[in-house]
């Protein structure tokens, strides 16, 4: 790898042995992917994925202690993925025992380490750090050192920043040395689309379902999506950005997409149009039948497929303020139609602490609370990693949560029916 004088000095230990090891790690990581150089990280803030104080992550805590003791901290303040636990979320005695005595026993200790390393603020824990309420929203063209897949795909696609799908720990190392390897999605060539996706549905496709279909088809490639602007329009307003948040998370978890382009909508597609499409790009046509085929392909891994759901999680990735408001309206209307006053399935809406704070300032918060819905900052995936929670029949409209856990996927409309009127689809 070709290094400049500053990078050579760091690698040679002129700024300390620990910083030299961090630099060496970043270089080795880049060399694995054929990077010939490093480029500066330019974003104001970083975002880290490893947010949970899992007992098994002893080496991580040892590394963090070493960095802190040697004064090798992040050059940027950073936000984190969501916390794994919240007392407000339903759990029984044994589930709670596993959370607190076996799984996340180092959470408080780890959060103290993060604050010493450069955490933005005490409650900066969310997978949607780019929300206006949170404040970690990169500018177009910013070079990032992020690793959370749903945040990376959003930053690349909707905001026009540049970031690879890095791993945990590599994210903070890039921030510490101030450089990331130059390969993949930070390069012009790496942002070219090698798939053309033609959306030919008769109605607006479900964001999570469409993203799932595309992710499973193109895997880690970059898709250029045509026809979706018919349903979303050509402006990145709150509703459209919310749609793309969920769509992108599904492409990233059901496949490994780190960037997508939406014709006439996302920044680079608006500017460069079809010049973003590489030669000999493959074509994938998605119509109603294809979405139904994908939906029907999802396995049901509950012990009893006919079980009544015991919990519903909405918000993986975390919900936007727009979603919390619109879902309040939908739940109230559906409950009134069904003649019910509270949801029939314990339901948890998850969002960033800063979004929840803003939501609580509106009249919607009291209205949603009356329906029995719990609003939490938790990471649903971390909750479901508890083996006792994983045995529960949990429903969700998140394709990310469906992919990584035993939760069962339903569309938003089906979820609304189940939690307000009861019964399976």
Image: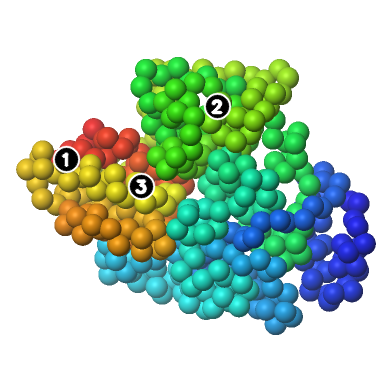
- Residue under pointer 3: 322
Which of the marked residues, 1 or 2, is nearer the chain's N terminus? 2
- Residue under pointer 2: 264
Q: Residue at x 47, y 54 (%)?
A: 132
User: On the rendered image, what quadrant is the C terminus found in?
Assistant: top left
Using a 10 Å C-alpha cutoff, classify the residue at mark 1 as few (fewer than 14 neighbours), some (14 to 19) or many (20 or more): some
Q: Is residue 403 visible?
A: no
Q: Is residue 314 above or below residue 273?
A: below
Q: Residue 86 lies in what quarter of the image?
A: bottom left
- Residue 204's spot in the image, x, y percent? 38, 26
Q: Is residue 266 visible?
A: yes
Q: Residue 168 lies in what quarter of the image?
A: bottom right
Give the alpha-carbon distance from disc 3 to disc 1, as whole Å: 18 Å
Q: Is residue 204 left or right of residue 265?
A: left
Give the total of numbered labels: 3
- Residue under pointer 1: 334
- Residue 225's spot in the image, x, y percent? 55, 26
Q: Is residue 364 left or right of residue 275?
A: left
Q: Are marks 3 and 1 in contact (CB under 8 Å)?
A: no
Q: Secondary structure at mark 1?
A: helix
Which of the marked residues, 2 or 3, is nearer the chain's N terminus? 2
Q: Is residue 32 left or right of residue 261?
A: right
Give the alpha-carbon distance from disc 1 to disc 2, as whole Å: 35 Å
Circle number at residue 242: none
């Amino acid at each position: 790898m070709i290094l400049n004088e500053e990078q050579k000095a760091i690698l040679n230990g002129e700024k300390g042995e620990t910083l030299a090891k961090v630099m060496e790690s970043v270089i080795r990581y880049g060399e694995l992917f054929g990077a010939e150089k490093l480029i500066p990280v330019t974003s104001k803030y970083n975002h880290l994925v490893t947010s949970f104080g899992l007992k098994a992550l002893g080496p991580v805590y040892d590394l963090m202690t070493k960095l802190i003791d040697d004064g090798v901290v992040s050059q940027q303040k950073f936000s984190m993925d969501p916390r794994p636990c919240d007392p407000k979320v339903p759990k029984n005695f044994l589930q709670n025992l596993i959370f607190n005595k076996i799984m996340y026993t180092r959470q408080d200790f780890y959060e103290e380490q993060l604050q010493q390393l450069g955490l933005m603020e005490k409650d900066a824990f969310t997978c949607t750090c780019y929300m206006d309420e949170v404040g970690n929203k990169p500018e177009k063209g910013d070079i990032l050192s992020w690793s959370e897949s749903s945040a990376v795909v959003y930053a690349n696609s909707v905001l026009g920043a540049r970031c690879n799908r890095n791993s945990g720990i590599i994210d903070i190392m890039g921030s510490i040395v101030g450089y990331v390897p130059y390969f993949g999605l930070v390069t012009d060539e790496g942002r070219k689309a090698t798939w053309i996706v033609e959306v030919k549905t008769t109605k607006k496709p479900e964001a999570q379902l469409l993203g799932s279909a595309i992710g499973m088809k193109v895997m880690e490639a970059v898709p250029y999506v045509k026809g979706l602007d018919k349903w979303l329009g050509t402006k990145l307003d709150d509703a459209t950005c919310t749609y793309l948040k969920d769509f992108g998370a599904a492409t990233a978890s059901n496949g490994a997409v780190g960037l997508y382009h939406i014709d006439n909508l996302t920044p680079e597609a608006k500017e460069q149009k079809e010049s973003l499409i590489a030669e000999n790009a493959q074509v994938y046509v998605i119509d109603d039948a294809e979405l139904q085929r994908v939906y029907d392909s999802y396995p049901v891994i509950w012990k009893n497929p006919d079980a009544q759901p015991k919990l519903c999680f909405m918000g993986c990735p975390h919900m936007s303020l727009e979603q919390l408001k619109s879902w309040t309206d939908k739940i109230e209307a559906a409950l009134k139609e069904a003649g019910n006053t509270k949801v029939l399935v314990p339901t948890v809406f998850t969002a960033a602490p800063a979004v929840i704070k803003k939501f609580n300032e509106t009249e919607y918060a009291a209205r949603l609370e009356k329906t029995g819905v719990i609003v939490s900052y938790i990471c649903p995936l971390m909750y479901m990693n508890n083996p006792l929670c994983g045995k529960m029949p949990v429903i969700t409209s998140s394709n990310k949560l469906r992919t990584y856990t035993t939760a069962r996927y339903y569309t938003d409309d089906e979820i609304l029916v189940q939690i307000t009127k009861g019964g399976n689809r």
